[in-house]
Image: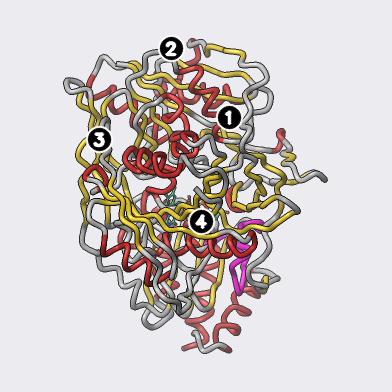
Amino acid sequence: MKILVCIKQVADGESRFDLDESGHLSLRESETAFRINRYDEFALEEALQIRDSLGDVTVEVVSLGPLRVESSLRRALEMGADNAYHLIIDTSPDTPLARARQLAFFAAARDYDLILTGIQSEDELWGQTGPSLAALMGWPCATTVIRQELNREDRTVTACREINVNSREMITLRLPALLSLQSGINRPRYPSLSHKLRARKQDIMRIDVGGGTADDNLTIKALHRPRSEKRGLRLEGNLQEKAEQLRELLRERSLL
Amino acid sequence: METGIYVIAEHNELPFTGTLEAFTLARVLASARGWSVHLLVLGSDIGNQAKQLAEKTGCDVLAIEGNALEEYSAEGYCAALREQLSGMEAGLICIPGTSRGNEYAPALALALSSGCLPDVTRFRTEGEHLVFTRTGWYGKLEMEAVISSPRGVLTVSPGAFRFEEIPRPPGRITRVHSDLPLSDTLDVQAETSEETESGLLEAEVIVAGGRGLRKAENLPHLHDLASLFRRSAVGGSRPACDSGWLSYGSQIGFTGKTVAPRLYIACGISGSPQHIAGMKGARFVVVINSDPEAPFFQNADIGIVARLEEFIPVFVEGVRASRS
Ligand SMILES: Cc1cc2nc3c(=O)[nH]c(=O)nc-3n(C[C@H](O)[C@H](O)[C@H](O)COP(=O)(O)OP(=O)(O)OC[C@H]3O[C@@H](n4cnc5c(N)ncnc54)[C@H](O)[C@@H]3O)c2cc1C
């Protein structure tokens, strides 16, 4: 049985997201911490747990992006993935459908039984790459999955989808299928030393995908800073002074 | 089929919050463009839902009924809508930005060769074009996008468009039958659990913690802070619940509780749209965050840039000293 986990590398949320004059992101890469999208870590952990409990399962990871994404693929190998594939592209296309096309092209002839993705990427928050990939593959898919059970004999997977914290839906899909996982489904592991050592010797397979595919139906024009909903008061001073101001402000409003 | 805006209701999402928000965006868009709005609702026996929607919105409702549509499934919704909407030459399809809506929207868009834009929060017109805004980049930036295909699929960000009922005569209801069979999706079953008691709904003051707590040992800071107020409770963002620091019954947000206290103190929460959707009704908001760029500050009445584990003890100490 073969499982593919799609991994996106993201800039950490506490990075500076500066814009250039035309409204495009200009990250100062040398000052930015890049890591695996946390939702994708849940997906990888889930795949590893399936392998741990069923045996005879190969877990592969794939990531689309420039050379730096290999640090995240390496991390995935350290966590325990069997094989890692890097779809090399200087600038990743800016829409989820275009990205999903690249992933679908890669996955098409590789006989996966299951593809796992995170529900969304923490940076861009699209939440569409997984379901778009499933649609391109012509596979059934379930999103916001917080529990799953794979049945190898029946070739089905039963997914529990979260609608909200008090309401869920159970759905059974025929394999091959794609699940997009919600946070909290598991606790992603830290790489063990032995896995770290093993991962150093593993190759990351590189596939040049060239210029990339476009999404003709959606154009991202520009980015901008959100406008403030409220003109809030930013407290200044040291901790003590801020604390005193807050106390006074809350008292004035009879909140304290 | 006429050019217009087709709002896809979620038949089992009662009381239709997401559906009515999607309808609200559709209504504003329609008046900007001179288009008409249609509501579509899918299910197996949904006369009742169709009637409610027609009354609430005053909009014509098309009820698509079939055995395969009794429970929501992405596959069933896509197949039925594809059939229904393939004659539509231009216009927009508006879908609630819920777990379900964001699940089937991309597949529907692909089936209709349409662009797909999730979680829309605003729009403006620019000549011929409609320019839509959505939140990205951890909420620190917004992106503007244009759908270039004649037909487009949108999902509507929860909480971004508040529905207000305008007194109008109810819309007409048309019922059509769909005899689509189910294929890959097998027996969908709903599962609900009891509302867990967290005291959040009754609380006048809520102290909420997020991933910025960083470890369970910092949790007492929230309780210390809450103890200064009468009728207070502690809640948090999803990651605080995922980490096991708080129970899921204490999760505030779009998929958790919706709260509206007099005072909301957010500690180490970035302010994602999904979190904000659950606390927008709070009357006074204090945000404590170590990142001066955290998006939550845009929703704050008072912003304090500080590490919560340093600030809260100083504040608590100060209040206690002033009381004794
Ligand atoms: C379908 C779906 C539904 C969702 N529903 C919900 C929901 O109902 N509720 C919800 O909350 N989320 C929900 N989410 C998740 C949501 O998208 C965000 O990921 C989440 O709200 C972020 O939580 P956070 O702000 O605690 O964490 P982060 O975004 O990681 O923010 C942590 C913040 O803490 C700050 N910080 C770090 N250290 C400190 C310190 N020492 N002192 C002070 N501040 C510090 C950082 O600057 C940062 O701003 C949902 C997601 C999906 C996909």
Label ID, residue A113: none
Q: Which amino acid lies under the numbered mark 2 shown in the image of this protein?
A: Ala
Disc 4 vs disc 3: which is toward the camera? 3
Q: Is residue B167 above or below residue A201?
A: below
Percent from the top left, x then y, of residue A32?
67, 38
> Circle 1 sits on which residue?
A98
Res. A139 image quadrant = top left
Dividing the image into 4 quarters, which one contains the N terminus of chain A?
A: top left
Q: CA distance from mark 4 to mark 2?
A: 36 Å
User: Disc 1, ligand 1: is the CB inside 8 Å?
Assistant: no
> Circle 2 sits on which residue?
A109
Q: CA distance from mark 1 to mark 4?
A: 22 Å
Q: CA distance from mark 3 to mark 1?
A: 29 Å
What chain letter is assigned to the residue under label 1? A
Q: Which amino acid lies under the numbered mark 4 shown in the image of this protein?
A: Ser
> Circle 3 sits on which residue?
B182
Q: Which amino acid lies under the numbered mark 1 shown in the image of this protein?
A: Ala
Q: Mark 4 packing: few (<14 Cα in 10 Å), some, or many (20+)?
A: many
**Residue ranking furthest to the left:** A153
Percent from the top left, x then y, of residue A225?
70, 55
